[in-house]
Image (spheres, coloured by chain):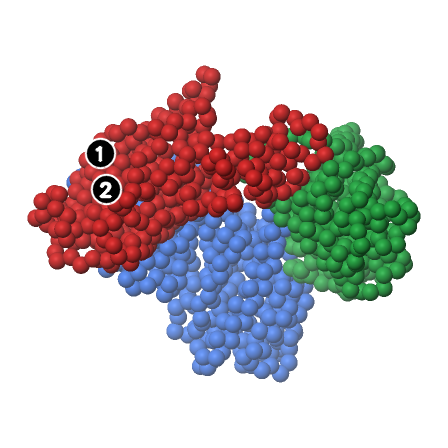
Chain colours: A green, B red, C blue
Amino acid sequence: MWLKNCWYVIAWEHEIPAGGMLSRTVLNEPILVYRTTQGLVAMEDRCCHRLAPLSKGQLEGDSVRCGYHGLKFAPDGRCIEAPGVDVIPSRARVRTYPVASHNRWVFVWMGEPERADKALLPDNFSCDHPDWVYKPGYLHYDTPYLLIADNLLDFSHLSYVHADTLGGSTEIAQAKVEIERVPQGIRTTRRVPDVPPSPFWQTFQRFEGNVDRWFIYDFLLPGTLLMSSGGRPVGNAPDDLRGGVEMHSCQTLTPETETTTHYFFQQAHRRAIEDPAVTDAVYAGLLQAFEEDRDMITAQFETIRSNPDAPMLAMPMDVALIQFRRLLEAGVAAERAAAAGS
Amino acid sequence: MWLKNCWYVIAWEHEIPAGGMLSRTVLNEPILVYRTTQGLVAMEDRCCHRLAPLSKGQLEGDSVRCGYHGLKFAPDGRCIEAPGVDVIPSRARVRTYPVASHNRWVFVWMGEPERADKALLPDNFSCDHPDWVYKPGYLHYDTPYLLIADNLLDFSHLSYVHADTLGGSTEIAQAKVEIERVPQGIRTTRRVPDVPPSPFWQTFQRFEGNVDRWFIYDFLLPGTLLMSSGGRPVGNAPDDLRGGVEMHSCQTLTPETETTTHYFFQQAHRRAIEDPAVTDAVYAGLLQAFEEDRDMITAQFETIRSNPDAPMLAMPMDVALIQFRRLLEAGVAAERAAAAGS
Amino acid sequence: MWLKNCWYVIAWEHEIPAGGMLSRTVLNEPILVYRTTQGLVAMEDRCCHRLAPLSKGQLEGDSVRCGYHGLKFAPDGRCIEAPGVDVIPSRARVRTYPVASHNRWVFVWMGEPERADKALLPDNFSCDHPDWVYKPGYLHYDTPYLLIADNLLDFSHLSYVHADTLGGSTEIAQAKVEIERVPQGIRTTRRVPDVPPSPFWQTFQRFEGNVDRWFIYDFLLPGTLLMSSGGRPVGNAPDDLRGGVEMHSCQTLTPETETTTHYFFQQAHRRAIEDPAVTDAVYAGLLQAFEEDRDMITAQFETIRSNPDAPMLAMPMDVALIQFRRLLEAGVAAERAAAAGS
């Protein structure tokens, strides 16, 4: 169940080498991304002739030559040369995708190209902002993306999956959560007063006592989390972060296939902390926690896959994820209706 | 094709650690076994909420807490705590299974719990008897359990698969076999006079000449073999075992999935032989032979799987296995009829 | 899509050990090949009793005994012994296949045995000829055989896949190709004047300048390539090979399953070159190039498999492969019609 008319992250900008190509599958479609003098190109990674991956060929200027029989494709997808062929048939072309680079994330638009709208790009500002610093992350999941979205939409799991990393207290799970609709998604606000600081923070900072923690994030279609979180010493005024921690995180899920997922993420801290060891510690702690998630979600998926008819029982902590799934279903249904009507 | 209303071995008792959990799949259902102050508990290894395996959580006293969102389940399967939830819905429960520990085998009842009847437990006495000694064995098979049952129901294969281990003479295959119905199964009696002793016995005992061998076993639904076997010097009176060998073996098959199987087994000898090296030799010889079986049955299954329509040709040596399959089919048909009528 | 009434290569002759057996799957049928006093036997590698592979048993003279329950099969496939069975049922037999050894290739006939006709064996003369010398090759492919046939039927790929090995110039792809029908297949003639010699030749011979290259081959049902190729210094008379290279190559594809293939091949040179290092170099260069093919075709197949509905676009260089596919389709349709009418 995938939305098509939306932007999906295909890569961190630095993953696309100068003079080289990156191939990655999105929504089951193999896509080649490369740089030209005119900017980025995203092209079907499959020759229209015998279906060989173009990524096994090579770049020639702004064009790509297939490594099997030598067909050459311009950045707009047209075949402009075929060895021994005088007149190239006009049907000889590969699909290209609208592509956008935005705050170091490279997005592709998987639906109708004429509907691609950069106003729909998410506000992943902390990925490219002078005040914020981070190390970029990527994980590959052998599970459907919606199980990961479920995880991100219910932070009660921090108390259990991440007891020794991001969590640190059962109060996170017990806290009441505010949920609101925002354009393209759901906003979740969870405040957890007077609890020990996250074990993960303690790898780079000393704390004298308990903190008031907060997690405020938007989770937006098709699968992007934008979060402010942190903790300040109990008793501090809301805007007094001395002795506390403030983070901004951008995370996004891109379905690779029905059962596999790309996960791009970062957690940024304020540049005020100059020590690069802090940035490393924030990244290392986050990665460790995300591997805890992957381990749990992979086990969950194996259980689901071996008994696909076992029902889930909705519980009160599922409110946000249920609302998000409804949004997604409504979007997919609208796309199908539009496709049937066109 | 599985019987449900019967006991299946899920583990050797020693496999369930004090203070820990064992997870094993039986008839495609993931099951968690653990010890409480009241005895063993067998519980669906799948949280009713989001289907995470409970075995990735932890024991809290006699209860289990899910490691994903913290739901806590009592030994009867009821959810008794959920973080942030005031009133637990009564539907929040996981299935539990009747469980019985009997002569060091731990059994679960996979059908209707009210029909669980300990009188149906097999008489695996030599697994826990002062006169008998053994080392416990377990093998995992990547084949359906019925192919292994077929193997155990026709010992003509000892002459070929086990020529150098359990067998040792083609007379085993040529011997006439008596087959009788017994409650819940088939009894097979095979006597092989005046043959060399099993090569396997010769690893722990010297023989002066030929022996009269016997194999008498019950093979009981759903898949348990209980066997007396041995050999005595030719000419000895039937009850004179001097210079001979006497064994009792308990073996049982538990389907894990349609195509994989758990195999629990032991071969016990009389405690009269005090030397622990003998016990080790008996175990090592048996394991070597059972790996010969697994190798052959796995190859057989690969051949079957790659050409599922190839027919088998019934031969005279198949009488016992055909009778057993009929018993099983009748049992499964009766269960289906009862389920349809209820 | 397989022809049945034709010869497929199952092995190089040297792969069948004296006193041993070779098991290989052809058209999804497991086949055992062994030597008897009367010649080669090809037999279904699957006991008619419980479907165990006979190749796990052993040869006894000219017969094979199953290693599971000891049934013994004569070279004509009849079961001639079964332990403990007095009267062997006449239905106890395994299929045998017409087999022919021809110029060191061992062929099996997969269709109706009475139609097996040695006149249909291909003329792979250079596999066993006093004037020609080679090292035999075998590769296993995890792709359908037709994708490999496509590759062999369009040498334009030499300029791209094999730019640094068999190819060496884009003129190969640009050359005009003559295509003719021959009995059982297609003849392709490609002449490439005044180009650098193949990089592959330069590993064993020095050239002073450009050469005129030629590739003339028949590609015959079900999947055999017989080729004369080479190059002579520009300006030489057609029959003057001084300073040039002349090769004869025999290659054949045998479907193992719908998605896997056996590939037997050699490239022979004239015995005139006595140095065995040349034979090694010819083999090594060919193998390197064929691994380039396998890499490309495997990638192509992965792309096809992940999106099986993506269409191929026929291009002018596909003439030979399209003609060959039509021949094959006509042959398969004729076999089906004959089967339906019989």
Counting the numbered discs, the total is 2
Tell me the residue at 73%/53% (across/down). Answer: A199
Tell me the residue at 32%/46% (across/down). Answer: B266
Q: Give coordinates of residue C145: x percent, y percent.
A: 52, 53
User: Which secondary structure lies at badge 2?
Assistant: strand
Give left or right: position of C338 versus B293.
right
Which circle, 1 or 2, is nearer the viewer?
A: 2
Q: Quadrant where the C terminus of chain C lies? A: top left
Residue A322 appears in the rendering: no
Q: Give coordinates of residue A168: x percent, y percent.
A: 72, 48
Q: In this figure, which residue is indicated by the disc labeled 2?
A: B228
Give left or right: position of A166 versus A183.
left
Which residue type carries mark 2?
Ser
User: Which secondary structure lies at badge 1?
Assistant: strand
Residue under mark 1: which chain is it in? B
The residues bearing labels 1 and 2 have C-alpha atoms spaced at a distance of: 15 Å
Direction top: furthest residue: B341
Residue under mark 2: which chain is it in? B
Tell me the residue at 57%/73% (across/down). Answer: C200
Q: Give coordinates of residue B104: x percent, y percent.
A: 37, 41
Q: In this figure, which residue is indicated by the disc labeled 1?
A: B179
Direction left: furthest residue: B235
Question: Front-most of A2 and C207?
Answer: A2
Q: Is residue A334 above or below residue B190?
A: above
Question: Front-most of B6 and C95?
Answer: B6
Question: Front-most of C310 and B67?
Answer: B67
Residue A269 appears in the rendering: yes
